[in-house]
Amino acid sequence: MGSRVEKETPLRRDARRNREMLIAAAREIYSDQGVDAPLDDIARRAGVGSATLYRRFAGRAELIEAVFGDSLRDILRAAEEARSAPDAWAGLTAYLERIFGLLAADRGTNDLMTTGIQGVPSLDALRAENHKTLDVLLRRAQQQGAARPDVTAEDLQFLLAALGRAVPGSTVAAPLAWRRYLALLLDGLRPEGSHPLPAPSLTSDQLGAAMLQLGKVRRPRTGRAD
């Protein structure tokens, strides 16, 4: 007995089309305005009502996951490639240049990578992988004599997030200006000419609290009020 193929009904086709239009509209608006853009604006751009958006997505975090899930997984693969580089400093530099290219090109990706937004599964995985990558490469670079010994992964994450928040503004006037400032930041990690640091590194908990404040991006909720 052959398998029965279930025919897609007009209602299901409409639901799928609405979901696709909402994701496309959110991708456009997030790229331009960041992930704190009003959900009602996304519904209007998609040509549907706000009620339709909430039927398709429980809230902002679920919509962010749908929009950015694939691109965040691409960054995970880039992190894995960077960790395999024999020269740790070259791997770290290449990884950060790739990340900052994304931050400059898309304001939504910038929000996700430089603030403490919670509740997005692929983003939670990316944060853990990013910290692991920075920690592994930094430690290896220190062992290879390429990075100053008193810098931690938390130091590097905070510096990168702070610089990353400034990238969208600089790209308006000079699209590649971020390359200059990333190079200056990386030069500060070199051991040559370094001086003792005046305060200890942030702890992991302190870094998380700082990231929540950086950029003042509010935490996504799952309710209709979002």
Image (cartoon, rainbow, N blue to C red):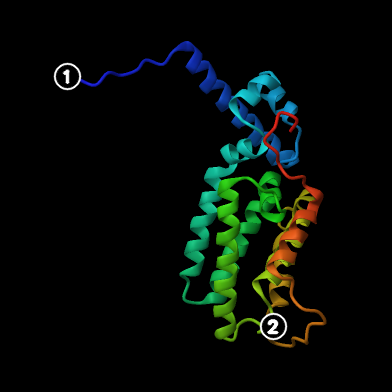
Res. 1 mark: 1
Q: Nearer the viewer, residue 109 or 54?
A: 54
Tell me where residue 52 appears, x and y as whole percent: 64, 20
Q: Is residue 83 above or below residue 168?
A: below
CB atoms of marks 1 and 2 within 8 Å: no
Tell me where residue 205 appears, x and y as whole percent: 71, 64
**Residue annotated with mark 2:** 150
Residue drawn at x 57%, y 47% as measured from the top left: 121
Q: Amino acid at mark 1?
A: Met
Q: Is residue 148 above or below residue 73?
A: below
Instruction: Give the structural element (helix, strand or loop) at label 2.
Output: loop
Tell me where residue 41 appears, x and y as whole percent: 74, 27
Tell me where residue 43 appears, x and y as whole percent: 69, 24
Residue drawn at x 74%, y 75% as measured from the top left: 201
Q: Nearer the viewer, residue 93 or 20?
A: 20
Residue drawn at x 65%, y 71% as measured from the top left: 153
Q: How many marks?
A: 2
| In this picture, residue 71 sits left or right of residue 194 | left
Q: Is residue 116 above or below residue 57?
A: below
Q: Residues within 10 Å of mark 2 (few under 14, many from 20)?
A: some
